[in-house]
Amino acid sequence: MAVNATTTNRSRCLKCGFTAPAGGDEWDHVVSPPLGRMTQCPECGSTNVMSGR
Ligand SMILES: [Zn+2]
């Protein structure tokens, strides 16, 4: 488990460019019944977040 790896899974907000570890506490979440749980950017509130893999 390399902590300083540059390939760490991260998610990025496509609207404002905010990045944080995928699934991390930095992200907010909204529950949308048809879609389930979505990641929401805490900076701009957008759910247009690209999940890192
Ligand atoms: Zn954002």
Image (spheres, helix red, strand yellow):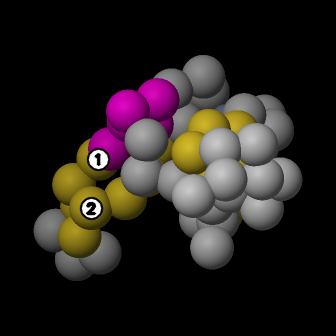
Residue 35's place in the image compared with 17, above or below, is: below
Q: How far apart are marks 1 and 2 (CA)?
A: 6 Å
Q: Residue 32: percent from the left, percent from the top?
A: 24, 61
Residue 17 horizontal side relative to residue 24, left or right:
right
Q: Identify the residue at image location x=60%, y=22%.
A: 43
Q: Is residue 49 visible?
A: no
The residue tagged with tag 1: helix, strand or loop?
strand
Q: Is the magenta stretch mostly helix, strand or loop?
A: loop
Instruction: Tell me if label 1 and label 2 are in contact, CB under 8 Å.
Output: yes
Q: Residues within 10 Å of mark 2 (few under 14, many from 20)?
A: few
Identify the mark at residue 46; answer none if there is no mark: none
Give the position of the N terminus as an image quadrant.
Answer: bottom right
Q: Name the residue under label 1.
A: 30
Residue behind label 1 places its C-beta within 8 angstroms of ligand 1? no
Which circle's residue, 1 or 2, is located before the other in the chain?
1
Some atom of ligand 1 lies within 8 Å of the CB belonging to the residue at label 2 = no
User: Which residue is situated farthest in the front direction here?
Assistant: 1
Comparing 3 with 50, the one in front is 3
Looking at the rendered structure, the kind of residue marked 2 is Arg
* Residue at the left extreme of this rendering: 33
Q: Where is residue 48 in the image (x, y as percent from the top left)?
A: 61, 55
Residue 53 at least partly seen = yes
Any mark on residue 37, and which? 2
**Left or right placement of residue 32 versus residue 48 in this view:** left
Question: Residue 34: where, in percent of width, then height?
Answer: 22, 77
User: SS of the residue at dot 2?
Assistant: strand
- Looking at the rendering, the stretch of residues picked out in magenta corresponds to 25-29
